[in-house]
Image (spheres, coloured by chain):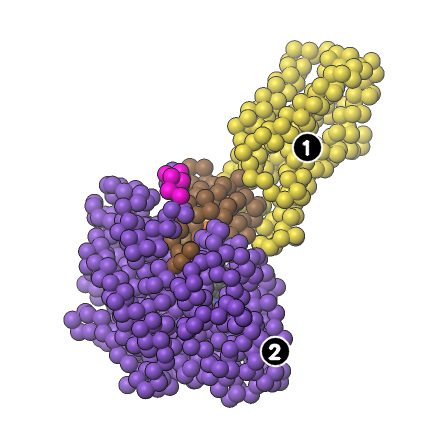
Chain colours: A yellow, B purple, C brown
């Protein structure tokens, strides 16, 4: 396995958002809030990164055993899906330590505000990632052939990343112009790469795990 | 936001320098102030403004703690109730920022009610209305217990605890509607009118009775969160013939020199605290003594809090403090038993008032409960049948013309809201709803929207800042003498006669500012005239040319009302009496 | 300059209702809160404390010159 390339991918996925966060003109808040924000940001870019850590890219990483790559994909997936699933709570959680609207009340307002598209997109993306997570954990228990599961996984991921990117660009506290462009390029090329494998390399689908 | 950029050119220090001097008045007029100067680009389709009529028994105007209790208690007494406020329930006026509420518990106090009233009267040098002082002691505990039930003491923000009893009763609350007019027909109150800040809509309220809970006001000062309050209720009521009082008194809070306009930091995090309950603790917090020291010695001041006597910092002369209330920092020596005192995060000066100060953070506001409508009895009733007022909108003199009991301002508003509500509900029982005639509606609509129709005129922001430059200097507002008061009055009359009729507005926000500016001009006139009339010094009113209390001539309050020709009239009303 | 910036707004409108001096409005196009009348901000932080997603930042300086009684 060519670790250099993996490290390169990670430094893009983690380093660039950190850089944009650091140099952007955002109000600086408490450490807790900033840590939670950065965690969410990185979780999201790591999710986009999943498009690059698939068996289709094994050539890029010069992987001999696909297993290692898949394992990495899984670990990253479960960890960062967890963070993504928690991130709505991250937003209201610091209210436990400061004065203001109560966290639960804030949360209720948060998930019931439908007059801007951002929250609606967020809720849809949330459901999608939840489904992606669950169908991955229980893949073996699903009455489904691997190839169909893989297709499902890919299609759900594409829809998720599109919806979630729109959500992040619309609502994200730190998605200024550079960060937005970064997200668009990263997720856009991820999606295109995956689609390419669907349409141009049917032989890939034949590989069994 | 470009405005702020433009203004960076004027350094604040430079500005303060000129504003403090007599030249300030003229200079201010020439400084580049924000908001679109030139043409009035009207953003409202003036010919397409809707009208909505609302009917109710009791109309409560104001969504502070007085309004809350007024609405609830009127409902419980069987009336149909509607509440309207220019801000949000529990998030407008002064209520959101007050954290100490007084509750008198006879089982838990070394004072009897009589002793409490006597102690307040002694500190207030007779300026308090004993009926209202007694009332707050009698009813405060019951109100505080209700607040407890609604979760008031468990929450930093009071919208939710206030909503609780309101929603339970299904009382209609209309927020972000600026009331500009009270309506009187056949000598009785008939309703009110205002406009929405969010849609192009005027609201007319037909009501059997109106309870004004519109709070106090000021000159949109810096450092005190009262920039939404401009004595609107007082002026509306004055305009239909109500008597108002208390305009010569002053709340004398200073602010911090650094970022003087920053209310939040100026109060050192008090806005982020949950409310608490305060016990009996009578004091004599002047505030004006600090302004006096600044006047005599100049700034920076090195001293303790107002009311405290610190060796070395004593200035000769200055406001009179009754013997038993001359005390050191926070220790009421005159009390039988000094109650345990927390840091006064209450009515008194902002906590931790250390560091460099500047004056006038609450400029334009009098002592709570000393200014507002004149009550004709202890039921919060005004001289206009059907019109009641409660809390900071009522000149009840509950605490006198000086801060006496910590936390009694919140408690007093709550108590009076409830008292006014019961009286109003009772009044409604034998009265019919009066229809507001179309002619009145048309006249009011015309008046209300006039600033939107002026293609040229003066921006409310500019007139406000000019007024601030005239009224806020220490030697006009706090340390008074006849010549200076008259000079300032000349300026204010100019604003009243020439600028007020030419206020312009380009949208609903500015329309609100235009009406608020108008109210501030009338308030300023009242303040100056009452201050000229009271030729003595007492409590928070201090005159350099009459520095002593004059018990022979001035055991009296000053009432202000509109004469038959529309001119402002002033009269005396003896302490401890009701209007005749 | 008093109320400073709004980041991460979900457009719930709470701050608009909550501001005593009517500084904020929802932008009809984006559906998000905008600082429409910064000169009228009294730096009271109510909007910030009520905002469910803590989107509002406020600085201690006023955007128009400050007039005081003595200084
Ligand atoms: C910073 C600060 C700290 C304080 N601390 C304490 C304390 O610790 N203890 C204490 O007892 N007191 C304290 N006070 C005083 C106390 O807050 C007030 O006396 C009390 O809250 C007044 O309540 P109210 O209901 O009478 O008026 P407010 O709370 O001022 O309410 C007025 C209402 O009227 C509405 N209104 C005004 N004009 C119009 C109009 N034209 N049309 C429609 N609606 C209108 C406003 O929107 C608002 O809802 C403090 C005040 C301040 C500013
Ligand atoms: S309260 Fe917060 S989230 Fe809601 S509109 Fe205002 S800034 Fe946006
Ligand atoms: S700080 Fe206060 S005045 Fe300023 S925008 Fe927020 S709520 Fe309004």
Q: Would residue B279 appear left or right of B367 to someone viewing this image?
A: right
Which numbered disc covers residue B339?
A: 2
Image quarter where the C terminus of chain B lies is bottom left
Q: Name the residue under label 1.
A: A43
| Of B250 and A131, the residue lying toward us | B250
Note whether A145 is above or below B77 in the view shown.
above
Residue B463 in view (yes/no) = no
Residue B493 in view (yes/no) = yes
Residue B163: % across, % down:
51, 63
Residue A114: % across, % down:
52, 43
The secondary element bearing badge 1 is classed as helix
Task: Kindly identify the residue that appears in the image at 39 percent across and 59 percent down.
Answer: C69
Is-magenta flag for residue B488? no
Question: Image quadrant of residue B150?
Answer: bottom right
| Of B50 and B461, the residue lying toward us | B461
- The residue most toward the left is B565
Residue range in magenta is B5-11
Q: Would residue A184 appear left or right of B433 to someone viewing this image?
A: right
Task: Kindly identify the residue that appears in the image at 81 percent across and 30 percent down.
Answer: A140
The secondary element bearing badge 2 is classed as loop
Image quarter where the N terminus of chain B lies is top left
Note whether A145 is above or below B364 in the view shown.
above
Kindly report which numbered mark, 2 or 1, lies closer to the viewer in this rendering: 2
Residue B152: % across, % down:
57, 66
Residue B344: % across, % down:
56, 68
């Amino acid at each position: 396995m060519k670790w250099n390339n993996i490290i390169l991918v990670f430094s893009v996925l983690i380093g660039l958002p950190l850089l944009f966060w650091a140099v952007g003109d955002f109000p600086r808040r408490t450490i807790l809030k900033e840590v939670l924000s950065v965690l969410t940001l990185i979780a999201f870019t790591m999710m986009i990164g999943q498009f690059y850590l698939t068996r289709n890219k094994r050539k890029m990483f010069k992987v001999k055993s696909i297993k290692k790559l898949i394992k990495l994909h899984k670990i990253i997936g479960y960890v960062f899906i967890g963070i993504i699933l928690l991130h709505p709570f991250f937003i209201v959680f610091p209210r436990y330590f400061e004065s203001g609207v109560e966290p639960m009340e804030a949360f209720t307002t948060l998930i019931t505000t439908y007059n801007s598209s951002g929250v609606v997109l967020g809720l849809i993306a949330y459901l999608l990632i939840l489904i992606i997570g669950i169908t991955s954990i229980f893949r073996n228990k699903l009455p489904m052939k691997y190839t169909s599961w893989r297709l499902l996984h890919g299609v759900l991921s594409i829809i998720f990343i599109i919806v979630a990117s729109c959500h992040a660009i619309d609502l994200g506290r730190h998605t200024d112009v550079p960060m937005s462009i970064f997200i668009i390029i990263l997720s856009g090329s991820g999606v295109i790469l995956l689609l390419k494998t669907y349409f141009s390399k049917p032989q890939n689908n034949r590989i069994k795990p | 936001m470009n405005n702020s950029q433009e203004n960076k050119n004027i350094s604040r220090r430079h500005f303060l320098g000129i504003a403090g001097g007599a030249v300030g008045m003229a200079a201010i007029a020439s400084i580049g102030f924000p908001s679109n100067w030139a043409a009035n680009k009207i953003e409202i389709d003036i010919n397409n403004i809707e009208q909505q009529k609302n009917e109710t028994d009791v109309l409560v105007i104001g969504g502070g703690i007085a309004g809350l209790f007024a609405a609830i208690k009127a409902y419980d007494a069987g009336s149909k109730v509607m509440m309207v406020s220019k801000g949000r329930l529990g998030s407008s006026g002064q209520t959101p920022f007050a954290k100490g509420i007084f509750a008198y518990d006879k089982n838990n106090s070394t004072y009897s009610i009589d002793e409490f009233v006597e102690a307040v009267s002694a500190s207030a040098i007779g300026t308090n209305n004993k009926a209202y002082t007694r009332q707050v002691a009698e009813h405060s505990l019951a109100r505080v217990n209700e607040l407890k039930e609604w979760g008031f003491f468990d929450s930093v923000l009071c919208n939710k605890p206030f909503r609780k009893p309101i929603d339970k009763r299904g009382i209609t609350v209309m927020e972000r509607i600026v009331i500009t007019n009270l309506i009187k027909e056949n000598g009785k109150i008939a309703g009110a009118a205002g406009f929405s800040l969010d849609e192009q809509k005027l609201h007319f309220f037909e009501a059997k009775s109106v309870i004004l809970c519109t709070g106090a006001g000021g000159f949109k000062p810096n450092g005190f969160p009262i920039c939404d309050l401009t004595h609107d209720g007082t002026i509306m009521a004055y305009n239909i013939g109500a008597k108002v009082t208390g305009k010569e008194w002053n709340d004398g809070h200073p602010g911090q020199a650094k970022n003087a306009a920053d209310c939040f930091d100026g109060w050192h995090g008090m806005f982020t605290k949950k409310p608490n309950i305060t016990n009996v603790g009578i004091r004599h917090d002047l505030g004006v003594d600090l302004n006096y020291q600044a006047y005599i010695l100049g700034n920076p001041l090195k001293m303790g809090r107002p009311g405290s006597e610190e060796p070395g910092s004593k200035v000769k002369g200055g406001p009179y403090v009754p013997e038993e209330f001359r005390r050191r920092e926070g220790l009421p020596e005159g009390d039988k038993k000094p109650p345990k005192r927390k840091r006064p995060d209450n009515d008194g000066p902002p906590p931790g008032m250390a560091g460099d100060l500047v004056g006038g953070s609450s400029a334009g506001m009098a002592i709570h409960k000393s200014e507002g409508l004149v009550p004709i009895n202890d039921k919060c009733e005004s001289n206009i049948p059907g019109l009641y007022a409660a809390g900071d909108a009522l000149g009840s003199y509950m605490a006198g013309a000086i801060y006496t009991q910590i936390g009694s301002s919140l408690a007093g508003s709550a108590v009076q809201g409830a008292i006014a509500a019961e009286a109003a509900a009772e009044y409604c029982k034998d009265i019919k709803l009066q229809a507001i005639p179309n002619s009145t509606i048309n006249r009011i609509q015309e008046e209300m929207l006039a600033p939107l129709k002026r293609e040229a005129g003066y921006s409310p922001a500019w007139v406000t800042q000019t007024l601030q430059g005239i009224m806020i200097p220490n030697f006009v507002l706090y340390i008074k003498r006849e010549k200076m008061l008259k000079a300032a009055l000349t300026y204010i009359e100019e604003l009243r006669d020439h600028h007020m009729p030419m206020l312009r507005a380009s949208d609903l926000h500015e329309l609100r500012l235009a009406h608020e500016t108008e109210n501030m001009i009338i308030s300023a006139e009242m303040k100056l005239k009452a201050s000229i009339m009271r030729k003595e010094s007492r409590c928070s009113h201090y005159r350099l040319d009459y520095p002593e209390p004059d018990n022979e001539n001035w055991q009296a309050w000053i009432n202000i009302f509109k004469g038959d020709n529309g001119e402002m009239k002033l009269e005396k009303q003896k302490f401890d009496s009701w209007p005749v | 300059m008093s109320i400073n910036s709004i980041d991460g707004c979900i457009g719930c409108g709470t701050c608009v209702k909550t501001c005593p001096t009517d500084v904020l409005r929802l932008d009809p196009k984006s559906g998000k809160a905008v600082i429409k009348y910064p000169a009228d901000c009294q730096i009271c932080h109510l909007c910030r404390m009520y905002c469910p997603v803590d989107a509002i930042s406020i600085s201690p300086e006023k955007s128009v010159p400050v007039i005081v009684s003595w200084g």
